[in-house]
Image (tube, rainbow, N blue to C red):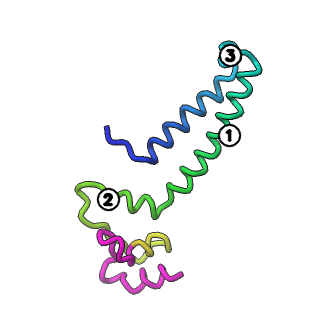
Amino acid sequence: MNLTGKQLLLILSAVLSALVAASAQLTDIFGPTTAKAIISVVSLGNTVLTSITAALSGQGSLLKDVAAMPGIEKITVNAQANQTVAKEAVSEAQPKIEATPAALQTVAETAKG
């Protein structure tokens, strides 16, 4: 199975969420003081991890991930692209992402903001 970095972060977040939800079981296993400490650390870690994952999961990042997939030759963007997508379409760093010839001027203007 080929998991991306974002998928691994989300799996870790799910495991941490399960631990937070298992506070009663952790109390039975470790006692109330230790369980409270575990839940506090896990809850804080899960909040930070979820925030990082949200920041890494934007449209620009998604577009780059798709372009990097094996078998993808080209992603073509039309005049309806938002600024994030338009920036990727006009970026020389992303040769697989491009604007349609008819939309090139509009996409370039959208990319500039």
What amino acid is labelled 1 in the image? Leu
Image coordinates of residue 58 in percent, x first then y, are: 50, 59
Residue at screen point 43% across, 58% down: 62
Residue underneath mark 3:
30
Q: Quadrant of residue 95?
A: bottom left
Looking at the image, tell me whether mark 2 or mark 1 is earlier in sequence order: 1
Q: Quadrant of residue 108?
A: bottom left
Residue at screen point 44% across, 75% down: 87
Q: CA distance from mark 2 to mark 3?
A: 45 Å
Q: CA distance from mark 3 to mark 1?
A: 19 Å
Residue underneath mark 2:
68
Report if residue 98 lies within the magenta region: yes
Are dots 3 and 1 in contact, CB under 8 Å?
A: no
Residue underneath mark 1:
44
> Extreme top residue here?
28
- Name the front one of labels 2 and 3: 3
Front-lying residue, 107 or 20: 20
Image coordinates of residue 96 in percent, x first then y, are: 29, 69
Q: Quadrant of residue 101?
A: bottom left
Image coordinates of residue 33 in percent, x first then y, are: 76, 21
What amino acid is labelled 2 in the image? Ala
Looking at the image, tell me whether mark 3 or mark 1 is earlier in sequence order: 3
Residue at screen point 40% across, 62% down: 63
Q: Which residues are magenta?
A: 89-113
Q: Secondary structure at mark 2?
A: loop
What amino acid is labelled 3 in the image? Phe
Q: Secondary structure at mark 1?
A: helix
Looking at the image, tell me whether mark 2 or mark 3 is earlier in sequence order: 3
